[in-house]
Protein backbone atom coordinates (compact mmCIF):
# COMPACT_ATOMS: atom_id res chain seq x y z
CA UNK A 1 0.00 0.00 0.00
CA UNK A 2 1.13 3.48 -0.79
CA UNK A 3 0.68 6.06 1.88
CA UNK A 4 -0.66 9.43 0.76
CA UNK A 5 1.92 12.17 0.53
CA UNK A 6 1.62 15.05 2.91
CA UNK A 7 0.49 18.30 1.35
CA UNK A 8 2.12 21.31 2.96
CA UNK A 9 -0.24 23.93 4.35
CA UNK A 10 -0.01 27.27 2.61
CA UNK A 11 0.73 30.10 5.00
CA UNK A 12 -0.47 33.58 4.16
CA UNK A 13 2.30 36.16 3.88
CA UNK A 14 2.39 38.87 6.53
CA UNK A 15 2.43 41.73 4.01
CA UNK A 16 1.23 42.50 0.50
CA UNK A 17 -2.12 42.43 -1.21
CA UNK A 18 -4.81 40.23 0.31
CA UNK A 19 -8.48 39.94 -0.54
CA UNK A 20 -9.69 40.84 2.94
CA UNK A 21 -7.39 43.85 3.36
CA UNK A 22 -8.20 45.19 -0.10
CA UNK A 23 -11.92 44.85 0.61
CA UNK A 24 -11.53 46.64 3.96
CA UNK A 25 -9.48 49.41 2.35
CA UNK A 26 -12.13 49.87 -0.34
CA UNK A 27 -14.88 50.13 2.25
CA UNK A 28 -12.98 52.78 4.20
CA UNK A 29 -12.34 54.70 0.98
CA UNK A 30 -16.05 54.65 0.12
CA UNK A 31 -16.97 55.88 3.61
CA UNK A 32 -14.37 58.65 3.37
CA UNK A 33 -15.67 59.75 -0.02
CA UNK A 34 -19.27 59.86 1.24
CA UNK A 35 -18.13 61.84 4.30
CA UNK A 36 -16.28 64.32 2.06
CA UNK A 37 -19.34 64.83 -0.12
CA UNK A 38 -21.54 65.30 2.98
CA UNK A 39 -19.18 67.90 4.48
CA UNK A 40 -18.92 69.77 1.17
CA UNK A 41 -22.71 69.84 0.91
CA UNK A 42 -23.02 71.07 4.51
CA UNK A 43 -20.41 73.82 4.01
CA UNK A 44 -21.71 74.84 0.61
CA UNK A 45 -18.29 74.71 -1.09
CA UNK A 46 -15.58 72.23 -1.84
CA UNK A 47 -12.82 71.36 0.65
CA UNK A 48 -10.17 70.84 -2.02
CA UNK A 49 -10.16 74.49 -3.18
CA UNK A 50 -7.35 76.45 -1.53
CA UNK A 51 -7.71 79.78 -3.33
Image: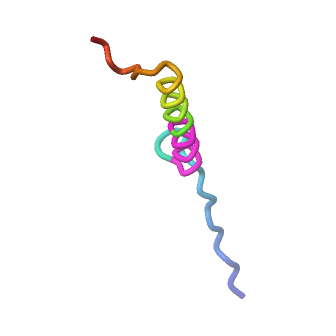
Q: Position of residue 4 (x, y in %)?
A: 68, 78
Q: Would residue 23 be counted in the magenta stretch?
A: yes
User: 29 or 19, which is in the foreground?
Assistant: 29
Q: Count how many numbered circles sit on residues in the image.
A: 0
Chief SS of the magenta region: helix
With 34 as the anchor, is 51 left or right in this view? left
User: 47 or 25, which is in the foreground?
Assistant: 47
Q: Position of residue 2 (x, y in %)?
A: 68, 84
Residue furthest top in the image:
51
Classify residue 49 by image quadrant: top left
Residue sitting at x 47%, y 42%: 16
**The magenta segment:** 18-29
Locate the C terminus by quadrant: top left
Q: Would residue 25 be counted in the magenta stretch?
A: yes
Residue sitting at x 59%, y 57%: 10
With 19 as the anchor, is 7 left or right in this view? right
How was the colour assigned to the protein in this rendering? rainbow
Residue sitting at x 62%, y 67%: 7
Q: Position of residue 5 (x, y in %)?
A: 64, 73
Amino acid sequence: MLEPTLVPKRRLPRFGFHTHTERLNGRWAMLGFIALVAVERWLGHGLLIWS
